[in-house]
Amino acid sequence: MTAEGGSLLETVQERGTLNCGVSGAAVAFSTLDPAGNMVGFDADFCRAVAAAVLGDAEAVNFVALTAAERFTAVQSGDIDVLMRNTTWTQSRDTDVGMDFGPTTYYDGQQLMGKASDGFSGSSTVADLDGATICTKAGTTTEKNIGDAAEAAGITIKLQTYEDFDIVTDNFISGACDVVTTDGSALVGRKAQQQPEGEEWVIFPGAPISKEPLGPTYGQNDSQWADVVNWTVYATIIASEKGINSSNASSVVGNDSYDAEAQRLMGGEGELQSLMGLSADAFQQVISQVGNYDEIYSRNLNPVGLTRDGSSNAGWEDGGLIYAPPAR
């Protein structure tokens, strides 16, 4: 909850920790490693916000939430920000009482079946007539696959579960013919859980929906929104400028970096102080967590999700990842 009459920023700074909602079961986005640490793309953006606000990327209380729990946690103030592969939609932006930050990952819904059942990378929704399709409850995925089946003139049996681990278990056992969710999640599951000797295939090549994923937070707190949004933007601009975790601390005063880079890292003309942050807030983000490309490569490349040629490439490389100027 916020301090009376104040922004959530003040509350988080006084508390000394960031309460960040994650899935906890999304391969490459937020899962527990063998040592019990929350790791992944979303988890690292939680750390980035903590580094900006508190100067310490590890000052995060990770709160694992199901899809059904996540929005209530935002609305109630149980979490300060949600980094949980959550799609930005008009209804969620207007009816649910939340605001959305910049898209950190452009995704799209796809399906996954077994080659032994006749599915291939060229399969389409039309090939699903009579199939049992499983997915997670409380997601856009349910509505999208229903709409796609209706448009294709086919009949499907849709089964939903609270946890995608259960979805995958039922797929492995044969209780589900096909599973569907964001393409990135399917790639992760295939990489980690495909049994030896079996081939899982992801289709169709063109996703059946747009799934822009990014941070979500309580509505009508512009200061907190600015902090979260510009933390994300700072990682993107740093990537563009060649600023990374190894050199972020040496940018200020270095003439080889332009004025925008100097401002972003806390040099002359910096704007972080006006946001209620320390001047070097974004320098801390990049030094402790990394720029966008570092965060992406560390977490998503190992499961086969590469930036090159995708929507998640930088705008300068033909992708959609783009930040407004820091000036």
Image (cartoon, rainbow, N blue to C red):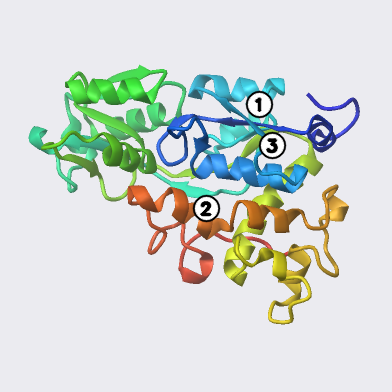
User: Is the residue marked by circle 3 packed among few (<14), some (14-19), or many (20+) residues within 10 Å?
Assistant: some
**Left or right position of 11 against 83:** right
Regarding mark 2 in the picture, which secondary structure is present there? helix
**Coordinates of residue 38 in the picture (x, y in percent):** 52, 34
- Of helix, strand and loop, which one carries label 1? helix
What mark, if any, has residue 295 been given in the picture?
Answer: 2
Amino acid at circle 1: Val
Mark 3 and mark 2 in contact (Cβ < 8 Å)? no
**The N terminus, quarter of image:** top right
Name the residue: 19% across, 32% down: 128
Give, as a three-letter code, the residue at label 2.
Ile
Q: Earlier in the sequence, mark 3 or mark 1?
A: 3
Tag 1: Cα neighbours inside 10 Å, few (<14), some, or many (≥20)?
many
**Which sits in the foreground, 219 or 16?**
16
Residue type at the position of mark 3: Ala
Residue 132 is at least partly visible in this image: no
- Residue located at (83% from left, 57% from top): 279
**Mark 3–mark 1 distance (CA, rounded to whole Å):** 19 Å
For discs 2 and 3, the disc positioned in front in the rendered view: 3
Location of residue 306 by image quarter: bottom left
- Residue 172 seen from this side: yes
Q: Marks 2 and 3, how far apart in space?
A: 18 Å
Q: On residue 59, which mark appears? A: 3
Q: Earlier in the sequence, mark 2 or mark 3?
A: 3
Q: Which residue is mark 1?
A: 74
The spot of residue 309 in percent (x, y) is 38, 63
